[in-house]
Amino acid sequence: MPIIVFHGHACFEVIDSEGRSIVIDPHDGGSIGLPRPEARADAVLVTHNHFDHNAVEVVLKPGGEKHIMRKGEFVVLGKHRARGIEAYHDPYGGRMRGKVVMYVVEVDGVRILHVGDLGHTLREEHVRAIGKVDVVMAPVGGTFTIGPKEAAEVLRTLKPKAFIPMHYWVPGVNLPLKPLDEFLRVIEGEHEVVRVGSNRFDTSEIGWEGTKVVVLEAPRK
């Protein structure tokens, strides 16, 4: 079962059973006020080409795989099935901020969805293309993406085992995002919140019924 490591903002590392690393949406740290991601990726997936999501050179090993806004079915590291699903960075069909590509990646039997800077609630065609997923990483901080209420709607629509909030304000971040607590207030009483206490989550721990909101500690300066 894969290990998920949160490197802050929208950057996640998925480590498979062979110890190989897939990083999604790497940032460079300094430009947004966070530590530089401590990851050495065998493959990198980028949901869209904005500076706080596409710092491929920061994490990718020499000769590693790059998948930049890749749509459709493909394979990562020769064995992990993936699908890129086009969506929008705003509620206006991309007219304000363009498009994003959400990724569903199946690693060691666990289906993981990273929605990137999703700017709208999911449409029917997105839900069909995504299918059943175990883990969802979604923004909750608003301004440039969906905010707390829309993120809660994504959670209710997809019903994953684990919903991991991302792209929210923490001390040091220089972007005008809402803090995590605003999202947690919206879903209070609906879902149990599990605070892991670190930035690492072992997906083998997912054995519960229903959905839990899994809060990983974002690295801070």
Image (cartoon, helix red, strand yellow):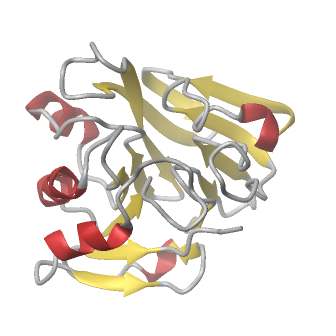
Foreground residue, 41 or 72? 41
111 and 188: which one is in front?
188
Which quadrant of the view contains residue 186?
bottom left
Residue drawn at point x = 27 percent, y = 28 percent: 90
Up-down relation of residue 45 to residue 37 (above or below): above
Give me the residue at 29% from left, 25% from top. Answer: 88
Place of residue 93 in the rendered image (x, y in percent of width and height, measured from the top left): 21, 17
Name the outermost residue toward the top.
95
**Image quarter hosting the N terminus:** bottom right
Q: Is residue 9 above or below residue 25?
A: below
> Disc count in the image?
0
Left-right relation of 186 to 60: left
Residue drawn 66% across the image and 54% down it = 33
Residue 7 in the figure: left or right of residue 152: right
Residue 77 visible, this orientation? no
> x, y (%) of residue 76?
61, 36
Residue 94 picture location, percent across and down: 28, 17
Residue 5 figure quarter: bottom right
Residue 159's image quarter? bottom left
- Left or right of 20 on screen, residue 15: left
Q: Is residue 118 visible?
A: yes
Which image quarter holds the C terminus?
bottom right
**In this rendering, position of residue 217 left or right of residue 94:** right
Can you give x and y, in whole percent of width and height, for residue 28 in the image? 72, 43
Give the residue drawn at x 42%, y 75%: 215
